Image (tube, rainbow, N blue to C red):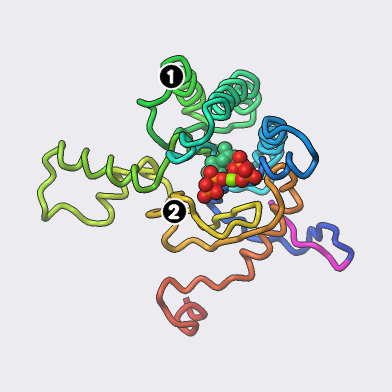
Amino acid sequence: MIAALNPNGEPDMTTLLAPPRHIAIIMDGNGRWAKARGLPRAEGHRQGTENLRRIIRACVEFDVKVLTIYAFSTENWRRPPLEVRLLMTILETVIDRELKELNDNGVQIRHLGRLDQIAPALQKKIQYACDFTQHNSRLILNVAFNYGGRDEIVQAIRRIVADGVTEDKIDEDLLNRYLYTGDLPDPDLVIRTSGELRLSNFLIWQAAYAEYYFTPTYWPDFDKEELRKAIIEYNRRKRRFGMTDEQIDTA
Ligand code: IPE
Ligand code: IPE
Ligand code: MG
């Protein structure tokens, strides 16, 4: 459940908001957060993971059903090898440290992206986390790790061809089913922190009709109250899906 804020800026339990069913977050700005404090980038990533834990909790509390987080893009391999290694280690550590609590909170973990280019030990760990939590249903947490929207579409087309699907069977529903997100609803709200105004290859198919929320706040500082603000803003938006206002108002 999520409440709007009263004029004093406190949650007003008489004004409940509809949470977006699916929120997708581009967790950006860890490096700049650290730089602004004279700290190494690694510390920014560490604080970023701490924040992720808070945001997952908030999503459970706000009754969001699906949370997709962008943790490592197919383009992030271009970073210095040391940073790439650090980001891999962080995922390993997070799985080791958080899996039990996530499971206790009813979180189902799924992975979006390519496993084949990841070190075998980490692949196994990701697979284990997904299997271990597969029967949970309170919140689906999609971890986009080694994920790229273009690559996802290319991989989907490859599998469609390999399955011998004939031309007449190809439509949007079919392509959807071949994406990593398969049966999941499209994101309703895409949030990007750190002030960048781009998608960086994130969910380019699925977010075709999402609402976008950009904030200058760096990811480590994007807390529960910032998330509430984004959801309040989302509730102000009018989603028309190509229709007119009148059609939406009568529906
Ligand atoms: C986001 O923070 C984390 C990842 C991309 C893994 P950045 O590392 O991109 O932080 P900035 O953009 O350099 O500040
Ligand atoms: C996008 O952030 C990827 C993740 C948040 C994991 P980047 O910081 O890598 O994106 P660009 O390179 O600035 O577009
Ligand atoms: Mg960045």
Q: Quadrant of residue 6?
A: bottom right
SS label for mark 1: loop
Mark 2 highlights which residue? Answer: 186
In which quadrant of this rendering is ligand 2 seen?
top right
Residue 119 disc label:
1
Identify the residue shown where x is 44% and y is 17%: 124
Residue 226 lies, in percent from the top left, at 73, 53
Note whether 97 is above or below 180 in the view shown: above
Can residue 2 be found in the magenta stretch?
Answer: yes
Mark 2 or mark 1: which comes first in sequence?
Answer: 1
Task: Evaluate whether residue 67 shows in this view.
Answer: no
The disc labelled 1 sits on which kind of residue? Ala
Range drawn in magenta? 1-7
Q: Is residue 91 left or right of residue 53?
A: left
Classify residue 148 as left or right of residue 57: left
In reply to whether residue 42 is colored magenta, the answer given is no
Residue 85 x %, y %: 54, 24
The residue located at (48%, 34%) in the rendering is 145
Classify 10 Å Cα crowding around label 2: few (below 14), some (14-19), many (20 and above). many
**Viewer-nearest of labels 2 and 1?**
1
Where is residue 174 shown, x and y percent of the image? 25, 50
On screen, residue 237 above or below 117: below
Confirm or deny contact between disc 2 and disc 1 (CB under 8 A): no
In the image, what residue type sits under mark 2? Asp
Q: Secondary structure at mark 2?
A: loop
